[in-house]
Image: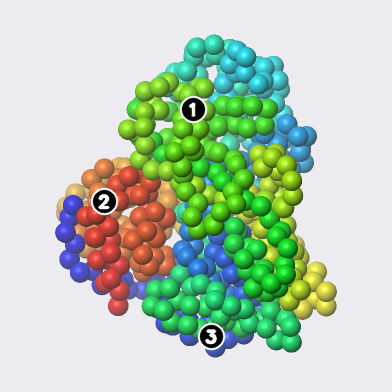
Amino acid sequence: MTTLQSVPALGTHPASGSLPSRAETREQLSRATYDLLVIGGGILGISTAWHAAQSGLRVALVDAGDFAGATSSASSKLLHGGLRYLQTGAVKLVAENHFERRAVSREVAPHLANPLTFYLPVYKGGPHGAAKLGAGVFAYSALSAFGDGVGHVISPAKASRDVPELRTDNLKAVAVYGDDQMNDARMALMTVRAAVDAGAVVLNHAAVTGLRFTRGRVTGAELKDSVDGTEFGVTARLVLNATGPWVDHLRKMEDPNAAPSIRLSKGAHLVLKRTRPWRAALATPIDKYRITFALPWEDMLLLGTTDEEYEGDPANVSVTEADTAQILDEAAFSIKDQQLSRDLITYSFAGLRVLPGGPGDTSKAKRETVVTEGRGGMLSVAGGKWTTFRHIGRTVMNKLAALPGHPLAEDMEPMNRLPKKLPLPGIANPNAVAHRLLVDGPAPGPRMAPDTARHLATHYGSLAFDIARLANESPELAERVHPDAPEIWAQVAYARDHEWAETADDVLRRRTTLTIRGLATDDVRDGVEKLLADRD
């Protein structure tokens, strides 16, 4: 691994300027009265802050950990219509999901999402027949206006050419449909940038220690900066609780007698090295309602997921041996044994789905968003799907506009008067960006490696040129962080100065893919920590 010299914080970013220090941000948060304080930096809170700032409100966003540090970076990495929802007749829901999926992947963030072909294998004795699944994928593609082609059925021989590890014993046919995938942590981070560009003030690693009250109404929060221990507060006309699995914890700060409003479902995933190239993903029916995924993602294979009720501390959610065994056993329905060796596992992660409270199997529960108002006037938002993150932001804003007395309505632009498909920062054709990075390298010295160029293009879009500039100016930043990964040290410096990275995990798990690849070695971690410490 390259030994880095001290690299000072970068100069002004060409687009948005370098970030203020944490002390400056705390001062800004402390001295103003905000229209809206969003507590929770998962994608629900981020999207709401983005839309609220667009509408003209003065917005603050805080999170006890990192942005997208919990459930929002522990998803199946899909933007999808929800094929299984057709089972329950939720045709309108699937059509709405498809609309949002296409908007994000084609117009809002084409640099962060990519189309993915799915193969749905039909085995003898399986829960569904070929005719039913063929009709299902046709209907699914019709609800997407055939934007990803027409859902159809192909032969096992054709499918096994695209997915060489597909198990063909007793395989009768394969249904085909299209969806999209993403790197969820990067998508969330770009949405934070969009919120800041629209005027929001944000701070991660700032935990709520209590709520502020004025005449019985929640009017802000007391916080503690977990980086240096500084205590401070934020005053706001309205507080939104978007803390995901912790939503009831914050509701009890507002009202100690608040009844539980949600239940949690754990979804575990495994990441494995691929033994051979995959040109499609597998979606294998396990029973009438559940599907297990095998997704080519970030040059690896992502397997999952589980769906079981979780009642422990959300901070302690983890992948158990039982989860690993279940995921591998279910994957074995359609994947050959050599691809499922435990020696190939590089990482595992688990997240918590937030579902409306009530009885019943979590796998059958609706992934709907619920907005409630507490006795102190704090709004709480919980539940929903990654695919519809923009729709959730608009839904919450419409709720704000309709509050009794309309406390914020006069100060905010109505949602129907704002751009419906405002792009995220860095929007560009990733193929064009990758080409430019390869062609426009420095005259002296080595060119950028193709895998690095492609990685930068599909994780930053046009902002990749800023990272290339850093690498050109400081040759040590052009070196790979680890020889087996495409990331370069310039990404670490960029994360430090422009992406709110405070800890090694912020960088290794969410700003880059090094942890997921199993490459966050002690040497790599030490190098990242040294570079993070070189702030001005």
Residue 189 left/right relative to 506:
right
Secondary-structure class at tag 2: loop
* In this view, 513 is above or below 289: below
Q: Are marks 3 and 1 in contact (CB under 8 Å)?
A: no
* In this view, 347 is above or below 225: above
Q: What residue lies at 67% left-to-right and 20% top-to-bottom?
A: 128
Mark-to-mark CA distance, 2 and 1 = 29 Å
Query: The C terminus appears in which quarter of the rendering?
Result: bottom left
Instruction: Find disc 1 in the rendering and name its residue.
Output: 329
Residue 183 at x, y = what percent?
A: 47, 48
Mark-to-mark CA distance, 3 and 1 = 52 Å
Residue 509 left/right relative to 311:
left
Residue 45 at x, y = what percent?
A: 60, 63
Mark-to-mark CA distance, 2 and 3 = 39 Å
User: Can the viewer see residue 408 in this picture?
Assistant: no
Q: N-terminal of the two: label 3 or label 1? A: 3
Give the residue type at disc 1: Asp
Give the residue type at disc 3: Ser
Residue 140 at x, y = what percent?
A: 69, 32
Instruction: Find disc 2 in the rendering and name its residue.
Output: 521
Residue 234 tag number: none
Q: Could you say which is closer to the camera, residue 433 or residue 275?
A: 275
Q: What residue lies at 58% left-to-right and 37% top-to-bottom?
A: 179
Residue 30 tag number: 3
Secondary-structure class at tag 1: helix
Q: N-terminal of the two: label 2 or label 1? A: 1
Q: What residue lies at 26% left-to-right and 51% top-to-bottom?
A: 521
Q: N-terminal of the two: label 2 or label 3? A: 3
Color encoding of the figure: rainbow
**Residue 372, picture quadrant:** bottom right
